[in-house]
Structures are given as structure tokens and as C-alpha cells.
Amino acid sequence: MKRTASLGPLFPVALAVLSIAGFAGCGKKESAALQAVGVARRDINSSVTATGIIKPMVGAEVKVGSRISGIVTKLYANIGDYVQAGQQIAQLDTLDLKAKLLQSEAALITAQAAQEYALSESARQKALFEQTLISRQEYDLSQKSIKAAEAQLKQAQANLTSSRIQLDYARISAPISGVVASVSTQEGEVVSASFSAPTFVTIINLKKLEVRAYVDETDIGKIKVGQAASFTVDTYTENDFKGTVTAIYPAAVIQDNVVNYIVTIRIEDFQGKTLRPEMTANVSLSLGVHQNVLAVPTSAIKRGKGGKYVLVPDGKAGTARPVKTGWKDATHTEILSGLKEGDSVIVSGSNGKDS
């Protein structure tokens, strides 16, 4: 992708229009009127542009389902409703579950009575054994009965706990706060949780969104975690949202033979606006600013076999001068060597390939 950026403060540039019928620079002639500009200092703010999509962060989108089967007797949520964490959004029929709970309570009472009897019987057997009125085997059997009764009591307690949990499952609550994005179950519908939890609603926390930008492979090496970023969306064209790079995906996304890498950007300030998943974002990733550097219009930079050069006016001819370049923004390129402030370069016409 091409790199673009906002321009820094402009410095006065002396422009001189040269009417040249032709010049001999690099052994070629140019018949058009050529324009020359002075080399001046300016700020070069470089950035990488990319197209992105707004997506929920991990944990910001939850599909709420049921862990038990049953009939949906009441649905309390509709698409677009805002729900708080813990708020009830659906209710399943509880007749069977309450009946099982009563059975578990009764089984617990029976197990408690069995344990009490086993304890009292063991005490009698112990007294008889101490008086040598019964055998050791009979006494050991009474001790075994106590352990069996204790095991049955624990099993009954576990069954009662399970029945209470199953009854609680009939009340479907929101695990997070957010907006109901979809509803996939209706009142009166029978849901089955035999193989997977059926989805009732999908909830999205619109305050936990991020931008996934698709950065071209030629630019991905310039991107670092922690870099500043900004983006716009079509629905709020007047807002420039700020963000920070949080991750760079190691695997590439290849589409139409174009290699891109996903860069995630945390949204720092929603500016009071409601952003939504799947919105298209026009992203600008800032690479930094080189302040007060020598720069020329990018159209003045040429490329030849010996490297980059510019044409400087020389009477009626343009003379090639090798240069070393640095950063560039939308219109200007930094000059590291080969020119000094106040020199002039030809910016119109062509004598070689543009940089």
C-alpha cells in the first residue's frame, strides 16, 4: 500500500519558472516548459494507510445458550435491547425440574434416616460384641452398614445439589453487559442441549471494539506494537478516531494474489459515537515525523542505473545530480545528501523514471 501522511509546517520556497527548449542532461532532450523549485526545509510526517474492519475484541461478543433441554416459556430480550450482566433474558419450563428437586430432597431424607439407623444399630452391636454375645463377623457387618449409609447420604446430597443447579439453568441470564445483536429462539420453542448448547441470543459489548487493519506486505515491517494510529468511518466522516497498535498477526491473509497482514488497533476514544462491528475503517498508521529536514517535491526524484538523482538547472540544460533520499510523505521526499538548502531542482518533465 502507498504511504501517505499529513504535511508538516511549510517553509518559504523560492519558485523559478524556466522556459527551456531542451536540455542535454543524461543524454535526453525535453521540449516542454520546465519548472524548478528551491530545496527547502520542512517536516516529513510519514504514515502507512490501510483498509480495516471494526470487530469485537476477544470476549466482547458472547453467544448465550442453554445447558439443559426444555421449552422456552418466556423470552425477555429483543434485538437492540441493552442488557446488564446477570439480567434474565429467557426462562425455560421448570415443572420437570421442580419434580426432580422434590425427589432429590426426599431421597436425602431417606439417606439421613438410613445413616441414623446404621449408627444406632452399630452401637447396639458393639455392646453385644463387648459382652461376647455376637461374633466379630456380625460386629464388622454393622460397621460396614455405617460406611454404606454414609456413602448413600453423600450421593443423595450430590443429587440434591445437581437438581438445584439444573433448576437454576432454566433461568437464562446475560453473562456480560451489552446490546442484543441477534435472537435465535422464540417463546414456545423446544430446545435440545443433547450435543451442543442452543443459542438464545448474541450479546455484543459495543465499548470493547477494535480495528483490524489489513497492511500490505511491503509496509508491515514498519509497523510496531504501540504505534499511534487513527481511522475514520464513513458514517462519521468528521471524526478522526485515535488508536494504538496492539498486535500484528504472524500469518498472512492472501486475496487476489495480494499479501496482507492483520494489525489490531485498540480504540482509545469513541468520541461519544456508536461504532458497530463490520464498519469499514480507513486507517492511517503513523511512522513518525522527521522535523526541519531538507526536502524536494517527490516528482523531482528520478531513478537511473546509478541510483536516484535530480535535475538541477544549468543554463538551458538540466544537469543530473545523484542524491540520497530518506522519508517521504504524500508530496515531498527527504534529501539526506547531494543537495543543500537554496539549490533548485526541476520538477516537471521527465528524464528517467520517477522515484
Image (cartoon, rainbow, N blue to C red):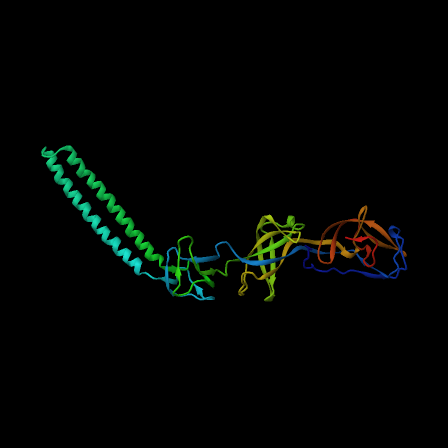
Is residue 227 rendered to the left or right of residue 104? right
Is residue 33 rendered to the left or right of residue 60? right
Visible residue check, residue 100: yes
Please give the name of the residue rendered at 30% of the width and 52% of the height, measured from the top-left corner.
161
Q: Quadrant of residue 187?
A: bottom left
Residue 181 location (% of width, % of height): 48, 63
Visible residue check, residue 180: no
Q: Nearer the viewer, residue 272 or 336?
A: 272
Residue 129 location (% of width, % of height): 12, 35
90 in relation to 142, above or below: below
Q: Nearer the viewer, residue 155 or 302?
A: 155
Please give the name of the residue rendered at 57% of the width and 62% of the height, measured from the top-left corner.
279
Residue 232 location (% of width, % of height): 61, 62
Residue 105 location (% of width, % of height): 24, 54
Is residue 66 rendered to the left or right of residue 41? left
Q: Quadrant of residue 286?
A: bottom right
Count of numbered circles on the image? 0
The quadrant of the picture occupied by the N terminus is bottom right
Is residue 66 rendered to the left or right of residue 1? left
Q: Nearer the viewer, residue 254 or 61?
A: 254
123 in relation to 72, above or below: above
